[in-house]
Amino acid sequence: MSLPPEQRVTSCVPLGVLLSLVLFSGCSAFDSGNDTSQNSDRLTAPFEPNVNLLADVNRDGVVDAEDEAGEDAWTADRGAIFLANIDDDQEICAFSMSSSILSDDALAACNDARDSEVNGDEDLLDLARLRVERWADAPGYAVGSISVTGPASDKVRLFKQIDGEFVSFRIANVLPLSAKNLREGVNIAIEANDIARDPAEWDGYADVVLSIYHVDRPQERFQDTVRLRVAPVVLFHHLTPVRNVYVSRLDIEDSSRFRGDLGRALAESGEPTAFSEFAVEDLWAQDYFEPAYMSMPRLEGGGAQHVIQVNYRSANVNWGATKAPLREAGRIVYWLRGRNQAAVQQYQTGMSSESQTLNSLGNTEVIPPYEKDGVKYPLGRLLRGRGPDSEPDFQPDPSFTKMLEAQAVQPPVYLDTSWLAVAHVDETLSFLPADTPRGWIALVADPAQARRMLQNAQAQGHGEAKLFTGMRWPYDRPAEATVSELLNHAGVMDANARAALEIDEQLLILREATGLTDDEIVRVPFLFQNAPNGATALQPGTVNLLSVSRSLVIAPDPHGLVIDGKDIFKVQLEEALAPHGIRVHWTDTWDLYHLGGGEVHCATNSAREVPSTKWWESGR
């Protein structure tokens, strides 16, 4: 925009930096082009530049005059967006599962933002665009700069288009502009070299400033500012179908059987779903990483999003390790890194060994989108487990928590999971899409209902009927137990009484946060038992399932009580989900997963279709 002479400002970029830019850019910074002004004229002639910097403020994928209004602010309705360019579009980053070849920090250091280059056409799509509008009459003694100062200064890199190519200069956050640039106008691109991690260090906003000044008076500048926000990382919720299901591949028969059944169920689902297997020794694909995404308006994309999938590595720290302090299987996020695939790790050492289970990402789930008391959460909210405030040594990694909360668009809800041996929220809760007013239902573990079902069976004369037929506990101990044996087992009943109380407390918090009603809750009955560090599922925990689509879930076979040829626990869940149009595919997890404290959800992970709701519409 054109500014009157009285709106000149004092430079906030150090004069030394401006002079350095002159040196870096050679004579071009003072290129007079077609200017014929005499030296005496430039001291007295009016200096009234056209100072107009534009970005995609209205988020339509096009930089034009419609982006002028409100460009120096960032709101739910307007504000430009850029990406952390931390994928590897040309797939040139080295990878190894061996920490003796590449340390954890060395793996994390490589991505497209590591250098000053645009790494191919695909990489160029990851850069947000700005434009300096032309000042046709710019005299040869007019020069300028594009700069980012403040906390964002070391988080960004600017590029200037020269002869059709976008190039960066030695100082990443500053670009020189010659008189020729000002006369012709110039296209600018910007990338971030990281996501927002700690609002106290950087809140994710970057003010990009166009400054134009008289070469003889560089301390006085005419400016235009555009505010951008780096895209937050958004976790997937279950209202969109899976697009890639991940599982660990172990060289044992049980793993082969599970993966075969899972693959067949996905193939028969009708969803265009990839199925990825990782050759790692870690069973728990849900725990060692978490797929998410970040996005900005696609360049000239007609309202579409340009998306980079972001895979978080879990913050599980191995005690005593130096080169590879983190859980080894989590290195897989760097194997996935590639075109539009990024990886992020964040952790701190010194946490208690007991608390490390909270850093597994089965303990970070997403409540689907909803509205309560006029407040909307169009991308849902994170749901995480932790210990009570009275247990400061049993909390998730605070640096990872700070990073999640810094994304801002999915404010978290916390539940006490300290009473569980594994202490993950996915042991007691899950969410499924459904044709309800809010569009989803909550599945909640209900040990009290499981007890009532067994009591009813006993009253009907099935007290000697068995659960877990043919199954075995570790050390080859028979798992079979009659209905009466379970109901008369004081330890089992005590464990379930406590579990019921703890789950009621979790549900109370969930109700207060979301406004869930009884009609929106599906009770999922199974028994708990005491383990050395807390409670764990005695029966396979059928709430720990994989939501594939609006019509299919894959759940663990409960190996429950069979009456008249039907497992009553299977029947209960099938009948509870049928009114919502959801079918259950049952799969056996007993030997491979259940005995280790997990089920289908713990065994798998999934990237999902990116929601049509854009994160910048969240109001956060």
Image (tube, rainbow, N blue to C red):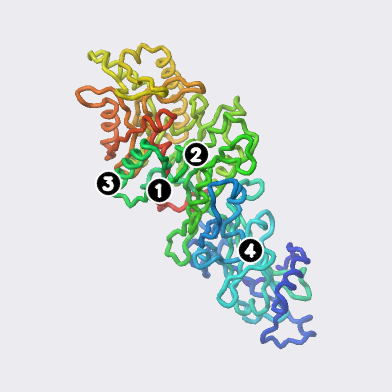
Q: Is the residue 453 above or below the residue 554 in the image?
A: above
Horizontal arrangement in the rendering, residue 238 relative to residue 73 (left or right): left
Q: Amino acid at mark 1?
A: Ser
Q: Quadrant of residue 36?
A: bottom right
**In 3D space, how far apart are the residues under numbered discs 4 and 3 (Cα atoms)?**
54 Å
> Measuring 50% from the left and 28% from the top, which residue is drawn there?
417
Query: Can residue 244 be seen?
Result: yes
Query: Can residue 74 be seen?
Result: no
Horizontal arrangement in the rendering, residue 527 relative to residue 225 (left or right): left
- Of the residues under marks 4 and 2, which one precedes in the sequence? 4
Are the residues at dot 1 and dot 3 in contact (C-beta closer than 8 Å)?
Answer: no
Element under disc 3: loop
Are the residues at dot 1 and dot 4 in contact (C-beta closer than 8 Å)?
Answer: no
Q: Nearer the viewer, mark 4 or mark 2?
A: 2
Residue 289, percent from left and from top: 49, 43
- Of the residues under marks 1 and 4, which one precedes in the sequence? 4
Tell me the tag on residue 361: 2
**In 3D space, how far apart are the residues under numbered discs 2 and 3 (Cα atoms)?**
28 Å
**In 3D space, how far apart are the residues under numbered discs 1 and 4 (Cα atoms)?**
45 Å
Q: Nearer the viewer, mark 4 or mark 3?
A: 3
Position of the N terminus, as image quadrant, is bottom right
Q: Which residue is mark 3?
A: 268
